[in-house]
Image: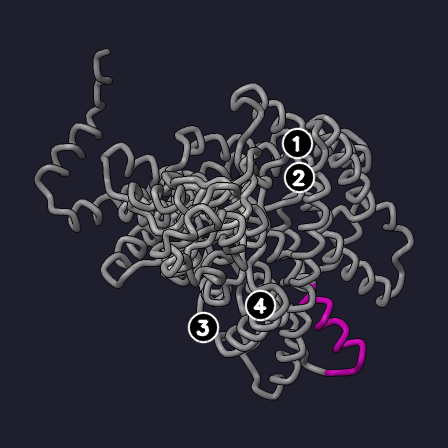
Amino acid sequence: MKPKKLNILERWLSKLHDHLNEKQFLILSSVLVGISAGIAAVILKSFAHFIQKQFVDQYLQAQDFKLTYVFLPLVGIGIAVLIIHRLYKGFLNTGLYYLLQSIAKKSSFIPFHHMWAHIITSGITVGFGGSGGMEAPIVNTGSAIGSNYARRHKLSYRERTLLLAAGAAGGIAGAFNAPIAGVLFALEVLLIDINLTAFIPLLIASASGALISKIILNENILLNFKLKQPFNYENLLFYVALALLSAVVALYYVNVFSWITSKFRKLKSKVKRWLIGSLLLAGLLVIFPTLFGEGYENIKGISELNTDHFFDHSILQNFIKHKWQILILIFLTFMLKTVAVALTIGSGGNCGNFAPSLFVGAHLGFAFALTLQYLGFKDVPVVNYTLVAMAGVLAGVFHAPLTSIFLIAEITGGYELIIPLMIVSSVSYAVVKYFHPDSLDVMRLKKKGTVVSEDKDTSILGKIEMTKLIETDFTVLKPDDNLGVIVENIKHSKRNIFPVVNTEQKLLGIITLSSIKEEMFNQELYTKLVASEIMLKPDVIIKQNDDIFNVMDKFEANWPLEFTGNRKGIL
């Protein structure tokens, strides 16, 4: 079989790889991966907005908007499900869950088709009104680019993981024009453990992705704000209260999203998932049109103190006449956004929780500010509360306080709000972590037995597979074997432990060399004692599906490993 011909760029990179040292090539690679991830972010966002303008907006002008909400998300999610079924054999790993799993269990290898599959399916899902964000698909795309680039050039696991993270950082930086947030996202959310030297490629990749976004992407597509009021320390107690509210809402988000998506995963029929999820989503959109799409336009609207968009095309439009009704509608909007996202993802759509977390936080902060106004407080910094709550909810949902702080700081063009951002993000994160030690995606991984941790030693332990530790080359004894037979077996064995099993291979006990040391030298007992009389019953029997940390807690000696009632081996 002839090797595939390399294109000009690959030939050039191969020559450079031969002439540059490891650090130099890694720096060059981080630039290329960051640029590619930034381009991917631009393509995905532009693709989704193109669909919305060319198909959705034109359709809205000719049809009853309420009926459109029923039709468009159903079609968009359906197309995404069909593409996955036809092109990817009915299965495409989506969300940050799979990315974390790839790092923890698959040596940071990501399938080749992930470099474009998320762009297509996510663009269609969100473009046609699916309620979710495009950041997770962007991160998956950028990470796939980094992973496959490293595989192509036969880089080590450490370098491959670093370029995977560089792709994620470049993608986030490109999506928000926020390079610092991109780097922190790779460290906090992907739990990448790197040294100071490896930090430089992440910075370069993130800066490259942000630069591409700034050059190419339309400013209207990016999420950005202008502050109208500086931070006032007299509002400190209000910010603390907002931090606690952000934590409560983040906990609500995590619990409700996990519960709904777990119910959908139990449905074996993908058609049922699609129909049930899409129709329920359509029902929500008829009443709450602001749940349509990724929601950044709505965030921009409330940051400009514009509430008119809340009622456009809603069946409740003619019933909203009082201020308290507006407040209730805003409250229901951010509470139901979680449900809408879970329905979109559960029904087969490809999107993520990053943008929805910002959406929920913005509406929480806005509702909090309006409540203070209604209670008679003057000069309420509405926009500041809106922005700070975005950071609070994001920090709680993703367990990423630093990412949240610097993301909001970067999209507002300065660090005027850095103190309230630090307070709200850290308090929200601390409260959520108390109730949920792991983030949304890590929690799901741990339920499946995959251990992901920011602690290096814990991560290394989590990569150990129990089945590879089991030793099976032991001399097995029968319960009626006498001491003479046991001693004879000991003579021909290099082991000091001997399992005793019955005819069904059921483990009855163990005999160790030290436990029969005295009896071994008394030949009168050779025909009088049998294995069942002198064997020891272990205090602990480890199951094959126990994780390594449960085993470590019990590991004070060589314990037998039992599997479905039969002896499997010794650990």
Q: Is residue 26 visible?
A: yes
Q: Secondary structure at mark 3?
A: loop
Callout in the foreground (3, 1): 1
Which residue is the site of mark 3?
Answer: 415
Q: Secondary structure at mark 4?
A: helix
Which residue is the site of mark 4?
Answer: 433
Asked if marks 3 and 4 touch (Cβ < 8 Å), the reply is no
Q: As shown in the figure, which amino acid type bears the numbered disc 3? A: Tyr
Q: Secondary structure at mark 1?
A: helix
Please identify the residue farthest to the bottom as the structure is shown.
234
**484 with respect to 412 (left or right):** left
Q: Residue at x 65, y 43 (%)?
A: 293
Q: Earlier in the sequence, mark 3 or mark 4?
A: 3
Which is more toward the observer, 42 or 104? 104
Asked if marks 4 and 2 touch (Cβ < 8 Å), the reply is no
Q: CA distance from mark 2 to mark 3?
A: 33 Å
Q: As shown in the figure, which amino acid type bears the numbered disc 1? A: Ile
Which residue is the site of mark 1?
Answer: 77
State which region is magenta. Answer: 364-377
Asked if marks 1 and 2 touch (Cβ < 8 Å), the reply is yes
Asked if marks 1 and 4 touch (Cβ < 8 Å), the reply is no
Question: Where does the image place residue 91, in percent across and percent down from the top left?
Answer: 56, 28
